[in-house]
Image (cartoon, rainbow, N blue to C red):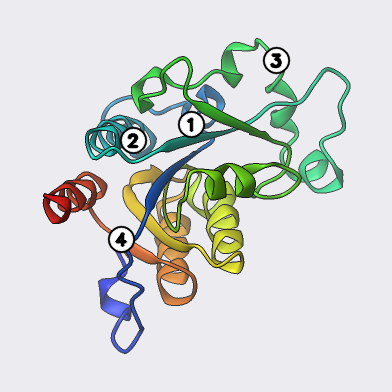
Amino acid sequence: MSTPEAVTVGVGRLDSTERPGLVMVDCQRLFTLGGDPGTALGAAAETCGAVVAAAREAAVPVVWLRVVFDEGEDLGPVWTAKAPALTQLRPGAELAEFDPRTGYRHGDTVVTKKRASGFVRTDLDDVLRGLGVQTLAVAGFTTAGCVRATVVDAASLDYSPVVLADAMADRSQPIHDAALVDLDARYADVVADGVAWFHALRGSAA
Protein backbone atom coordinates (compact mmCIF):
# COMPACT_ATOMS: atom_id res chain seq x y z
CA MET A 1 0.00 0.00 0.00
CA SER A 2 1.47 3.34 -1.03
CA THR A 3 -1.40 5.63 -0.05
CA PRO A 4 -3.74 5.46 2.93
CA GLU A 5 -7.17 5.57 1.26
CA ALA A 6 -8.19 2.30 2.91
CA VAL A 7 -8.08 3.77 6.41
CA THR A 8 -9.49 7.25 5.83
CA VAL A 9 -13.18 6.39 6.23
CA GLY A 10 -14.59 8.83 8.76
CA VAL A 11 -11.39 10.86 8.99
CA GLY A 12 -11.90 14.57 8.36
CA ARG A 13 -10.17 16.36 5.51
CA LEU A 14 -8.59 19.80 5.61
CA ASP A 15 -9.17 20.39 1.88
CA SER A 16 -7.19 23.61 2.12
CA THR A 17 -5.69 25.45 -0.84
CA GLU A 18 -5.59 28.91 0.73
CA ARG A 19 -2.26 30.74 0.29
CA PRO A 20 -0.17 27.69 -0.64
CA GLY A 21 3.55 27.22 -0.19
CA LEU A 22 5.89 24.28 -0.75
CA VAL A 23 8.58 23.09 1.64
CA MET A 24 11.15 20.66 0.26
CA VAL A 25 12.71 18.68 3.10
CA ASP A 26 16.36 17.61 3.00
CA CYS A 27 16.66 16.89 -0.72
CA GLN A 28 20.39 16.31 -0.22
CA ARG A 29 22.60 13.67 -1.77
CA LEU A 30 23.12 11.87 1.55
CA PHE A 31 19.40 11.14 1.75
CA THR A 32 19.00 10.16 -1.91
CA LEU A 33 21.93 7.72 -1.97
CA GLY A 34 20.89 4.54 -3.67
CA GLY A 35 18.20 6.52 -5.36
CA ASP A 36 18.89 5.55 -8.94
CA PRO A 37 15.92 5.60 -11.32
CA GLY A 38 13.75 2.58 -10.58
CA THR A 39 14.33 2.64 -6.82
CA ALA A 40 11.92 4.24 -4.35
CA LEU A 41 14.37 7.02 -3.48
CA GLY A 42 15.28 7.59 -7.12
CA ALA A 43 11.67 7.77 -8.24
CA ALA A 44 10.88 10.20 -5.42
CA ALA A 45 13.84 12.42 -6.33
CA GLU A 46 12.64 12.62 -9.92
CA THR A 47 9.09 13.34 -8.77
CA CYS A 48 10.35 16.07 -6.46
CA GLY A 49 11.75 17.83 -9.50
CA ALA A 50 8.41 17.61 -11.29
CA VAL A 51 6.54 18.83 -8.22
CA VAL A 52 8.85 21.83 -7.81
CA ALA A 53 8.39 22.70 -11.48
CA ALA A 54 4.61 22.49 -11.08
CA ALA A 55 4.75 24.71 -7.99
CA ARG A 56 6.78 27.31 -9.86
CA GLU A 57 4.28 27.24 -12.74
CA ALA A 58 1.49 27.88 -10.22
CA ALA A 59 3.47 30.80 -8.71
CA VAL A 60 3.71 28.98 -5.37
CA PRO A 61 6.73 29.92 -3.22
CA VAL A 62 9.25 27.14 -2.63
CA VAL A 63 11.41 26.88 0.51
CA TRP A 64 14.20 24.33 0.84
CA LEU A 65 15.27 22.74 4.11
CA ARG A 66 18.72 21.25 4.55
CA VAL A 67 20.79 19.76 7.37
CA VAL A 68 24.32 21.14 7.67
CA PHE A 69 26.65 20.99 10.68
CA ASP A 70 29.74 23.14 11.02
CA GLU A 71 33.01 21.32 11.69
CA GLY A 72 33.02 20.16 15.29
CA GLU A 73 29.37 21.07 15.85
CA ASP A 74 27.46 18.67 18.08
CA LEU A 75 24.69 16.62 16.46
CA GLY A 76 22.89 16.35 19.78
CA PRO A 77 22.41 13.17 21.81
CA VAL A 78 19.72 11.58 19.63
CA TRP A 79 21.35 11.99 16.22
CA THR A 80 24.79 11.21 17.67
CA ALA A 81 23.42 7.81 18.70
CA LYS A 82 20.86 7.17 15.97
CA ALA A 83 22.25 8.92 12.89
CA PRO A 84 26.04 9.40 13.12
CA ALA A 85 26.22 9.53 9.31
CA LEU A 86 24.93 13.09 9.56
CA THR A 87 28.46 14.17 10.51
CA GLN A 88 29.08 13.99 6.74
CA LEU A 89 26.79 16.98 6.22
CA ARG A 90 29.46 19.66 6.47
CA PRO A 91 29.58 22.96 4.56
CA GLY A 92 30.78 22.31 1.02
CA ALA A 93 30.56 18.52 1.30
CA GLU A 94 29.18 16.80 -1.79
CA LEU A 95 26.73 14.75 0.27
CA ALA A 96 25.33 17.96 1.76
CA GLU A 97 24.47 19.39 -1.67
CA PHE A 98 20.95 19.29 -3.07
CA ASP A 99 20.31 16.42 -5.45
CA PRO A 100 19.95 18.12 -8.86
CA ARG A 101 17.04 15.85 -9.76
CA THR A 102 14.90 17.52 -7.11
CA GLY A 103 14.71 20.91 -8.82
CA TYR A 104 16.73 23.22 -6.59
CA ARG A 105 17.91 26.44 -8.23
CA HIS A 106 20.69 28.70 -7.05
CA GLY A 107 19.08 31.63 -5.27
CA ASP A 108 16.08 29.69 -3.95
CA THR A 109 15.14 30.29 -0.32
CA VAL A 110 17.04 27.87 1.94
CA VAL A 111 16.59 27.27 5.67
CA THR A 112 19.35 25.33 7.42
CA LYS A 113 18.32 23.12 10.31
CA LYS A 114 20.08 21.01 12.91
CA ARG A 115 17.22 18.79 14.04
CA ALA A 116 14.53 16.66 12.42
CA SER A 117 11.81 19.30 12.25
CA GLY A 118 12.32 22.25 9.98
CA PHE A 119 10.76 24.48 12.62
CA VAL A 120 13.09 23.67 15.53
CA ARG A 121 15.70 26.39 16.16
CA THR A 122 15.19 27.90 12.69
CA ASP A 123 13.40 30.88 11.17
CA LEU A 124 11.19 28.70 8.94
CA ASP A 125 7.98 29.90 10.59
CA ASP A 126 9.00 33.54 10.08
CA VAL A 127 9.93 32.84 6.45
CA LEU A 128 6.59 31.18 5.72
CA ARG A 129 4.57 33.85 7.53
CA GLY A 130 6.46 36.48 5.58
CA LEU A 131 5.46 34.74 2.36
CA GLY A 132 1.83 34.64 3.51
CA VAL A 133 1.65 30.84 3.49
CA GLN A 134 -1.26 29.01 5.13
CA THR A 135 -1.55 25.75 3.18
CA LEU A 136 1.83 24.05 3.46
CA ALA A 137 2.62 21.35 0.91
CA VAL A 138 5.53 19.17 2.00
CA ALA A 139 7.79 16.80 0.06
CA GLY A 140 11.28 15.37 0.40
CA PHE A 141 13.25 12.97 2.57
CA THR A 142 12.63 10.91 4.52
CA THR A 143 8.94 10.25 5.02
CA ALA A 144 8.99 8.90 8.57
CA GLY A 145 11.88 11.10 9.65
CA CYS A 146 12.31 14.78 8.91
CA VAL A 147 9.23 15.03 6.67
CA ARG A 148 6.97 13.70 9.41
CA ALA A 149 8.59 15.85 12.10
CA THR A 150 8.15 18.98 9.98
CA VAL A 151 4.52 18.19 9.16
CA VAL A 152 3.62 17.56 12.80
CA ASP A 153 5.14 20.87 13.85
CA ALA A 154 3.42 22.66 10.95
CA ALA A 155 0.08 21.37 12.21
CA SER A 156 0.96 22.49 15.74
CA LEU A 157 1.64 25.98 14.37
CA ASP A 158 -1.79 26.02 12.68
CA TYR A 159 -0.68 25.62 9.10
CA SER A 160 -2.81 23.34 6.93
CA PRO A 161 -0.33 20.64 5.85
CA VAL A 162 -0.59 18.72 2.58
CA VAL A 163 1.72 15.72 2.22
CA LEU A 164 2.73 14.94 -1.38
CA ALA A 165 3.08 11.17 -1.11
CA ASP A 166 4.71 10.48 -4.46
CA ALA A 167 7.41 13.11 -3.88
CA MET A 168 8.95 11.49 -0.82
CA ALA A 169 10.40 8.15 0.20
CA ASP A 170 12.01 6.27 3.04
CA ARG A 171 14.57 3.48 3.13
CA SER A 172 11.83 1.06 4.18
CA GLN A 173 8.59 0.91 2.18
CA PRO A 174 6.52 -0.33 5.18
CA ILE A 175 7.79 2.57 7.30
CA HIS A 176 7.00 5.01 4.47
CA ASP A 177 3.48 3.61 4.18
CA ALA A 178 2.87 3.65 7.93
CA ALA A 179 4.02 7.26 8.18
CA LEU A 180 1.60 8.31 5.45
CA VAL A 181 -1.29 6.56 7.19
CA ASP A 182 -0.46 8.26 10.48
CA LEU A 183 -0.02 11.71 8.96
CA ASP A 184 -3.27 11.46 7.02
CA ALA A 185 -5.19 10.34 10.09
CA ARG A 186 -3.81 12.95 12.50
CA TYR A 187 -2.03 15.94 11.03
CA ALA A 188 -2.42 16.50 7.28
CA ASP A 189 -4.09 15.66 4.02
CA VAL A 190 -2.05 13.09 2.11
CA VAL A 191 -2.42 13.37 -1.67
CA ALA A 192 -1.14 10.73 -4.07
CA ASP A 193 -0.08 13.00 -6.96
CA GLY A 194 1.77 16.19 -6.10
CA VAL A 195 1.97 17.51 -9.66
CA ALA A 196 -1.78 17.07 -10.12
CA TRP A 197 -2.39 18.93 -6.86
CA PHE A 198 -0.46 21.96 -8.12
CA HIS A 199 -2.12 21.76 -11.53
CA ALA A 200 -5.50 21.85 -9.78
CA LEU A 201 -4.39 25.01 -7.98
CA ARG A 202 -3.68 26.64 -11.32
CA GLY A 203 -7.07 25.55 -12.61
CA SER A 204 -8.92 26.96 -9.61
CA ALA A 205 -7.10 30.28 -9.95
CA ALA A 206 -7.87 30.62 -13.65
- State the residue at coordinates (26%, 31%): 53
- State the residue at coordinates (63%, 46%): 126
Question: Does the image show residue 118?
Answer: no
Which is more N-terminal, label 4 or label 3?
4
* Mark 1 and mark 4: Cα distance apart in space: 24 Å
Q: Which residue is mark 2?
A: 48
Q: Residues within 10 Å of mark 4 (few under 14, many from 20)?
A: some
Q: Residues within 10 Å of mark 3 (few under 14, many from 20)?
A: some
- State the residue at coordinates (15%, 56%): 204
- Work out whether residue 166 or residue 200 is closer to the camera in this orientation and state it: 200
- Work out whether residue 197 or residue 167 is closer to the camera in this orientation and state it: 197
Which is more N-terminal, label 2 or label 1?
1
Q: Is residue 13 toward the left or the right of residue 85 in the image?
A: left
Residue type at mark 2 is: Cys
> Which quadrant, please, contains the N terminus?
bottom left
Question: Does the image show residue 181?
Answer: yes
Q: Position of residue 137 (x, y in %)?
A: 39, 51
Label 3–label 4 contact, CB within 8 A: no
Answer with the quarter of the image where residue 52 lies.
top left
Q: Which residue is mark 3?
A: 91
Label 1–label 2 contact, CB within 8 A: yes
Q: Position of residue 51 (x, y in %)?
A: 28, 38
Q: Which residue is mark 4?
A: 17
Which is more N-terminal, label 2 or label 4?
4
* Mark 3 and mark 4: Cα distance apart in space: 36 Å
SS label for mark 3: loop
Residue type at mark 3 is: Pro
Which is more N-terminal, label 3 or label 2?
2
Q: Which residue is mark 1?
A: 27
- State the residue at coordinates (29%, 38%): 55
